[in-house]
Image (cartoon, rainbow, N blue to C red):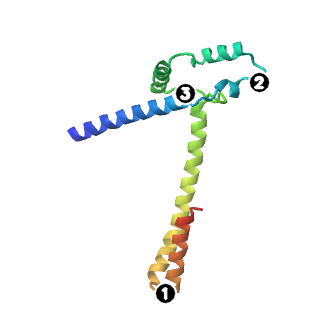
Amino acid sequence: MKKIAVRVVSTLLLLLLSSLAVFSAIRMSGGDVTAARLPASASAEDRRLFREQIGLDKPILEQYGTYMGNLLTGDLGNSLTNNADIATLAKDKIWNSFVLGATALVLVFAIGVPLGMVAALRRNTWIDTGITSFSVAGMAIHW
């Protein structure tokens, strides 16, 4: 039980430190969010007000604290580049990944298992060699 508790605590600490590192790297990358969100004709004052409005004028640790507080309440926030809701964006991407994974799984069972059975029944024949070569090539290519 103690090993599990140590593993859980160390995993949570690793996740926290990783999120802080990624958050800091993104904030310090040098890009200007106002270039993506405001028109090119926006004045320097408009850009300053916008940074202040979304909290980019605060120290990075304060920004991170706000981010983590929102995250813990289920608010993923909005994208800095296009102001889209991150939860909606993630939902779309997760759905697409699910469809892709489910399709791959169906293909594996519909094609791979029968071919594996044929290769096993025709062991050490040209059929076995052809099916094995096809499957190795498929794994190497990752269609």
The correct choice, above or below, for 3 with respect to 143 in the image is above
Residue at 48% of width from left, 23% of height from top?
64
Residue located beneath label 1 in the image: 125
> Identity of the amino acid at label 1?
Thr
* Nearer the camera: disc 1 or disc 3: 3
* Mark 2 or mark 1, earlier in chain: 2
Task: Tell me if residue 97 comes above or below residue 27 in the rendering.
Answer: below
What is the CA distance from the residue labelled 2 to the residue labelled 1? Answer: 68 Å
Across and down, in percent, residue 84 comes to 64, 30
Residue lying at the far front of the rendered structure: 30
Depth check: 22 or 93 in front? 22
Tell me which residue sits at (51%, 73%) in the image.
114
Does the CB distance between marks 2 and 1 fall below 8 Å?
A: no
* Disc 3 target residue: 27
Q: Look at label 2 and name its amino acid.
A: Ala
91 displayed left or right of 113: right
Question: Most extreme residue toward the bottom, as rendered?
Answer: 125
Q: Nearer the viewer, residue 98 or 2?
A: 2
Location of the C terminus by quadrant is bottom right
Q: Amino acid at mark 3?
A: Arg
In the picture, the disc for residue 41 is none
Q: Is residue 30 above or below residue 91?
A: above
Tell me if mark 1 has few (under 14), some (14-19) or many (20+) residues whose alpha carbon lies within 10 angstroms of its own.
few
Quadrant of res 88: top right
CA gap, disc 3 and disc 2: 21 Å
Q: Which residue is mark 2?
A: 40
First in sequence: mark 3 or mark 2? 3
Q: Secondary structure at mark 1?
A: loop
The image quadrant that residue 130 belongs to is bottom right
